[in-house]
Image: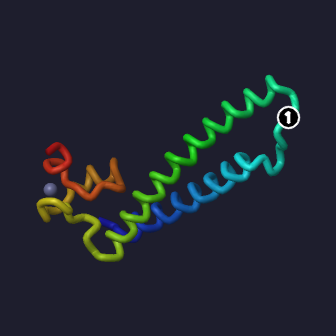
Amino acid sequence: MDTEAVRTRLLKRREELQTRASSARADLRHESDPLSADFAEQVTQRETDEVLGAISESAREELRRIQAALRRLDEGVYTTCSVCGEPIEEGRLAAVPYTDRCRTCAKG
Ligand SMILES: [Zn+2]
């Protein structure tokens, strides 16, 4: 398994997420879009805030998983199941790059 290619992919994805998260945060602070005085518009803006909050929360969760996967790469245990110690199937890692469990342990 080409773990350097995986690392490159994870680092690239981390950068995308960080960019997205910081621009979502900027939107939340209304840096370029101050809250409207009109009440109806305020309600709409608040709903948009909730959507942005959800996006950045899922981005944060993915970032945590990327950090963990990068740490596993550094430690040389990326392809080793953290539960049973057997190698994780390559197809599984390709489909779920942040996993730390083999197919059998993921089911259990
Ligand atoms: Zn396992």
Does 57 sit left or right of 40 as displayed?
Answer: left
> In terms of image quadrants, where is residue 70?
bottom left
Q: Nearer the viewer, residue 83 or 51?
A: 51
Q: Which residue is mark 1?
A: 36
Mark 1 Cα-neighbour bin, 10 Å: few <14, some 14–19, many ≥20: few
**Distance from mark 1 CB to nearest ligand 1 atom below 8 Å:** no
Quadrant, the C terminus: top left
Q: Residue at x 33, y 52 (%)?
A: 94
- Amino acid type, residue under disc 1 in the picture: Ser
The type of colouring in the image is: rainbow
Percent position of residue 75, x then y: 30, 76
**Figure disc tally:** 1
In what quadrant does ligand 1 lie? bottom left
Does 1 sit left or right of 19 as displayed?
Answer: left
Percent position of residue 49, x then y: 67, 38
Residue extending farthest to the right is 37
Q: Residue at x 32, y 69 (%)?
A: 72
Q: Residue at x 35, y 76 (%)?
A: 74
> In terms of image quadrants, where is residue 39?
top right
Q: Nearer the viewer, residue 101 or 88?
A: 101
Residue extending farthest to the bottom is 75
Quadrant, the N terminus: bottom left
Q: Secondary structure at mark 1?
A: loop
Percent position of residue 66, x then y: 43, 60
Percent position of residue 100, x then y: 26, 58
Does 46 sit left or right of 2 as displayed?
Answer: right
Above or below residue 76? Residue 105 is: above
